[in-house]
Image (spheres, rainbow, N blue to C red):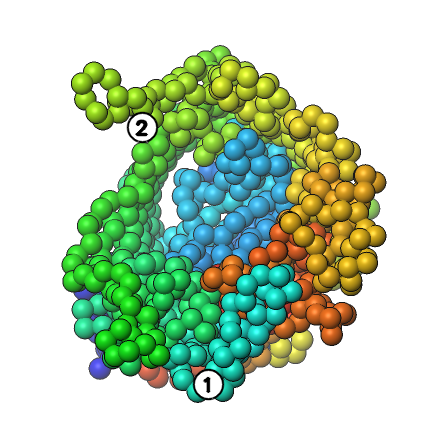
Amino acid sequence: MNIKLYIYTILLLSGISVHSGTLKAQGVDTIFAINGVVVDENNQPVADVVVSIQEERGEVITGRDGEFHITSTNKSTDLVVFEKQGFKRIEMTAEDLKDVVVLKTTPVEMGIDDDVNIPFGVRKKREITGAISSLDMDKMPTNLTGSLGNYLMGRLPGLYVSDAGNTPGNNSSFLLVRGEDAYPAYGGNRSISPLVLVDGAERPFTELDAQEIESIAVLKDATATAWYGVRGGNGVVLVTTKRGSSSKSEITFDATNIWQIPEFMPKVVDSYSAAVLIHNALEAEGASPRFSQEQLDGFLSGSDPYLYPDVNLPNQLLRNKTLSQRYVVTASGGNRIAKYYALGSFYNQGGLFAGTKQDEYDSNLNYKRYNFRGNVDVAVTKDLDVRMDFSGRHQDLRQPGAGWSSVYHNIMRTPPYAYQLINPDGSYGGSSIFQQNPKAQLEKNGFRSTMRRRLLATLSVKYKLDDVLQGLSANAFATYDIDQDFNSGKEEDYQVYSYDPTKPEGQQYTRYGIESRLVYRKTSWSQYSRNIEFWGGFDYDRLLGAHKINLSTKYQQGELSVSETYPLKFQGLSFRASYGYKNRYLAEVVSSYNGTEAFMKGKRFGLFPSASAGWVISEEDFLNDSPLLNYLKVRASIGSVGYKGMDEFNSYSRLFPYEDRYMPWGGGYPFGTGFSAGMQTSPLAYPNENITWEKVLKKNAGIDMQFLNRSLAITVDVFKENRTQILTSSLIPSILGRGTFPMNEGAAEYRGTEGSVNYSKRLGAVSVSVYANYTFSKNKVTAMNENVGLPDYQKRVGRSLNSVYQYIALGLFQDEEEISNSPVQQFGRRIFPGDIKYKDINGDNVINSLDAVRSDDLSNFPTSFFGFGSTLKYGGFDFSFHFYGNMGSTESFKGIIYRGNNNNGYVTEYSDQAWTINNTDAKFPRFAINERSNNNQNSTFWNRSGDELRLKNAELGYTLPTSVSKAVNLTSCRFFLSGMDLLRFDHSDGMHSSGIGSYPWMQSFALGVSVKL
């Protein structure tokens, strides 16, 4: 069967519109051969020029000699398009095409690939005077995870992305722009993440398929973010999805099989070794022994597997790998009147649990996601343009009935000596202490499913008013987004039996729990949200000789409703004016006047102005002919933006903090003749009529340079931010039984630098591209309401925002004499040899909370993060790799030796490295059971550098020769091998918490194919 016809049939049956001119019966149209050569203004051949027939599929690329060969079906009407970065785009009919096509160069950073998305607009890189970093998603390798956040780590200067992990369905990554910018507010609800916008509307983006996205831009300084005023203080991430092209039609199909393997899984300590450690620890503490000598001998000999079990639960109940799949189909194209882009994708990620398939259900952790998108652009008339976007996602997360976390923790934390999973009579094993058998949880506890449906619609209209004023247009933009979760599944319950073969027949089994039959779970709807936004206004774009003017003003109104919380409403006006003279002298003013009803009338709105300027120095006569320096632009910006956490004032207890309000509570007092208690009402916190948003003064200076015939590009920015009116706890005492709302009395600042380097060069038959980016940010608290009487070494003011609060460890106590001659440590009833010894900071010969210190050298967030990598191409082969790293953070390994307590405690593989009388130079303190509090304090003993470097991505691809692809009726076909999170270099010293208390980090390996028709 014809491959092309087969895929077209699938697309048509799926409801995806296909350009009517792309399917043609062979022999119907006359084919004309078009040959020529592309040269520059100096008559030199130009390689890598993309040549295509407008509104048709397929393209050719000129070689080193500039030659091209393409076919046309209608010489008089077919438009041939020539495109290459750094040159002006050319369109001409096939009939008018000459043997030699001359491409004219464009000014630096004014080429066809130099578009940068800004709020409701597009600028060339050369015109940007603010701090904006952008990423072209078509140049990225294949995404092997369900989260776009993991995919973006280290890709953009100024954007910090925390790893979301690889738990199926966990796609949310934590984002920061230029590092942490303020301490958590009152109650810990303050978000420090940037505003994320997808096609202009506030929407989550980590669940998008990478193929949906055209570019991602990070807006960092004042002029870049002031458009959003009270919502722009933490930076803005603009995600722009793909749209159709009038110059070509294209269908793509990607298929990827992904194998995920745990990066590290903890080793299970055998029953005898674990029992001996626990026995000796309890004996040293003077406590009753947990095991008798007979039991210890039984564990050693393994004489009775039921009386002395030695069970490796991870080995039996977890797989050593999981399989995921990703399939994507896209169709794009159009003509001068209408353009379209359509996408359908499927992502399926399996879990690590084994033995989950039952007759009635499968309880394994599993995540399925279906994405769809249709973006349509229509030129209704010569003056009226309409954009209609409709997209959505259907997600289904399945997990065991008890929840994947409960099952996983039971597998990892149940000691090997607890019980056999299955008793001799086939019943599930258990005991009075361990009544949750993870095998039974997977086989006889049902499953739960959470289905999320998200629908997003956007309508954008532009009406040109050239008849009124040349370059003037009226614009309207509206969105309506909804999503909701539907919870369902099946449930049943099980019994476990404690088996004791030493008891008489008929008394050997003791039952725990109640068994129930399989029934459907009660279904429910949850997590409903609705987001409505409207923007409307005017744009004026005009080129008057050497003067370029861009004006934009828009009114905005929106409402966000999340579940049962009060709708969040916002309103405002935004204005932007840009001016350029000869593409050399640039200036921009951006301001907004907006606010929220979360604050008191008269204090809801604020003005957020900003200004920036740029100078392309390389255009001046004294640098114009420099043989080394091709481009030099300096820019600077200053301005004020705001921040009002949209998640801080939407719960009932925090809603309208300027009002004196009451909350109904349960558990009141009975009145009258009834016995049930009525609802009681209590006052909320004292109102704060002066509460308002945070003010952020942003300053930025940057320089953009290009060298060596534009092959080397360098960008450097320095920045400083002063943030005032941060919410901090009130110092008013709660003497009347009521709390107080926070006060706008906090302040912080941060400063830093960031930069990027890109180098691209063709060396003979090899194309090389190398890149690197780096961000450093140093911050400190300048004002904060802290407890009265704190010693200076514990105060947060003057220190970094997330300075680590810890005790200074001086090693381990070696004997009782050392303990007696040291200050009294009050963390527990008694101190033993092998316990951690702490420094007496205040000199009172007692170690307590007054001896903890704040360290500026350590932070819970990195102070710098970076990424670097390269792409090489030779013939049909391509290879790319990407490293990600961060520095300046702290990681704690506290509790890695032992967890749990005397009854349900378990031993890790590191426990045998604990201090003993015979191992006084041990890496860890003594192995403790009951007396642990002294060693569980946050201290320098446990804190290690969190610096790390990862080989985040590597990909090897091969594209079939054009002649081979055409033989099977394809435009191109590429096969690839890809990997993610392949290597990690850190300071963990062999210690890993991954897999012990959480789902393990996963390494991903993939084999895939990408086809274009």
Q: CA distance from mark 1 to mark 2?
A: 55 Å
Residue 914 location, x and y as percent?
Answer: 67, 68
Residue 11 location, x and y as percent?
Answer: 24, 65
Q: Identify which residue is drawn at 73% across, 48% down.
A: 825
Q: Identify which residue is drawn at 34% across, 58% down.
A: 403
Q: Identify which residue is drawn at 57% across, 46% down.
A: 176
Residue type of the residue flagged with mark 1: Gly
Residue 654 location, x and y as percent?
Answer: 44, 26
Within-10-Å neighbours for mark 2: few <14, some 14–19, many 20+: few
Mark 2 secondary-structure assignment = loop
Asked whether, in this view, residue 949 is left or right of residue 503, the answer is right
In the rendered view, tell whether residue 955 sits above or below residue 693: below
Q: Nearer the viewer, residue 107 or 461?
A: 461
In the rendered view, tell whether residue 823 sits above or below residue 813: above
Total numbered labels placed on residues in the image: 2
Quarter containing the C terminus: bottom left
Asked whether the residues under the numbered discs 1 and 2 touch, taking CB atoms below 8 Å apart as contact, a structural biologist would say no
Residue 289 location, x and y as percent?
Answer: 54, 67
Q: Nearer the viewer, residue 749 or 55?
A: 749
Q: Which residue is mark 2?
A: 666
Q: Which residue is mark 1?
A: 302
